[in-house]
Amino acid sequence: MSANAAATSTVRRRPGVLAVHSVDHVAFAVPDLEQARQFYAAFGLTVKPVAGGLEVYAAGNPNHCWLKISAGAGKRLRYVSCGIFADDLPRFREKLTRLELLQAPPENLRPSDSLWLRDPHGVALELRVADKLTPDDKIISERKSTPAGVVASYSRGKAPKVQPERLSHLALFSPDVARSVQFYQDVLGIRLSDKSLDLVAFMHGAHGSDHHMIAFVKSNAPGMHHVSWTVGSLDEVGLGAAQMQAAGHPRGWGTGRHILGSNYFYYVRDPWGSHCEYSFDIDYVPATMDWNAGDHAPEDALYLWGPDLPADFMNNTEVVS
């Protein structure tokens, strides 16, 4: 298949392709752990205190840690962990050794069987044997209304709390988007889905994943722009926005719909200038498909409909060290 058609697949991996299959978790530091606990709990995630910081879990896989948060002088991305298949570990070790990319783990991390490297802009990357967390197919959701004569909505007091199912994708700042795309493609096997000039790029997993599991946004330095979380309906996107506004987090962007990826969205600005996204109904790239990547005009890079982009939405507030 080579067309961007509505295709489905139950293939869990693409034969003969060496590539990471998932974003396993993201580790970063913030200056106030209690503030982080309150923010992510209000967002609808489960936050657990652990030695050295916090771990964040989602309702769809309550035993998997998606975020590891430690204390620091300012907001700082520590590393991105990517999942690989067990039989790909020796192949990746040989490849990274040959390319002279293997490195020791970042500070305060004990040695393990994981492989460590850094991207061209210094972002630490872990390759670890782990379960595939990206979906193996697209889940088709339909909004079913009530019959005539039956009320479809409910009172605000009975609105359920939004609890995201899983981490959908991660967006990173990059000083050179094209260079980042080339590196993640050549070294990690992640494939380009769509881009807009040198401003933004979206990349999917070769073994089947959402339209993007990693994206890159142009900036003057590396860092974390947002983490995106899957919810079950457009209604949950709107309820999530109201949920965070009621919790004291009124700054955000949405509700709207993206063009690249097609998902409905609402972004909440966190206390450190990054964002958390509620996302619903993103495009899916099966493992059997060669997606036709496009280079889109800047006006199509962000949204099909929705409110104007906040002036500070693309600001990089990362502490560079």
Image (spheres, grey):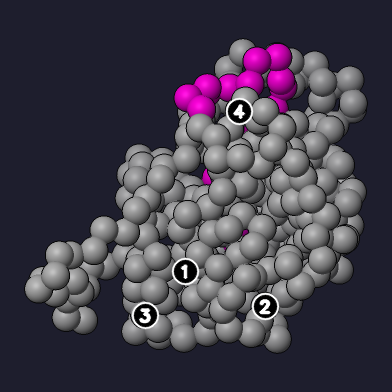
Which residue is under mark 4? 287
Name the amino acid type tagged 3. Answer: Ala
Q: Are marks 2 and 4 in contact (CB under 8 Å)?
A: no
Circle 3 crowding by C-alpha within 10 Å: few under 14, some 14–19, many from 20: some
Which of the two discs, 3 and 2, labels the residue nearer the N terminus?
3
Q: Is residue 156 above or below residue 208?
A: below
Q: Quadrant of the N terminus?
A: top right
Mark in front: 1 vs 4? 4
The residues tagged by marks 1 and 4 sit, at their Cα atoms, a distance apart of 36 Å
Given this view, does label 3 or label 1 mark the residue nearer the observer? 3
Of the numbered discs in the image, which one, if any, rests on residue 313? 2
Q: Residue at x 86, y 42 (%)?
A: 182
Q: Quadrant of the C terminus?
A: bottom right
Dot 1 or dot 2, earlier in sequence = 1
Residue carrying label 1 = 36
Residue that badge 3 annotates: 242
Q: CA distance from mark 3 to mark 2?
A: 19 Å
| Residues at discs 3 and 4 in contact (Cβ within 8 Å) | no
How far apart in space, not on screen, are marks 1 and 2 (Cα)?
A: 20 Å
Indicate which disc, 1 or 4, sits on the residue closer to the N terminus. Answer: 1
Question: Mark 3 vs mark 4: which is more N-terminal?
Answer: 3
Q: Is residue 6 magenta?
A: no
Region of the chain picked out in magenta, as a range: 9-29
**Res 240 quadrant in image:** bottom left
Q: Which residue lies most toward the left here?
A: 149
Q: Is residue 200 visible?
A: yes
Query: Horizontal and vertical percent for residue 197?
Result: 87, 61
Instruction: Using the image, determine if residue 172 lies above or below residue 312.
Output: above
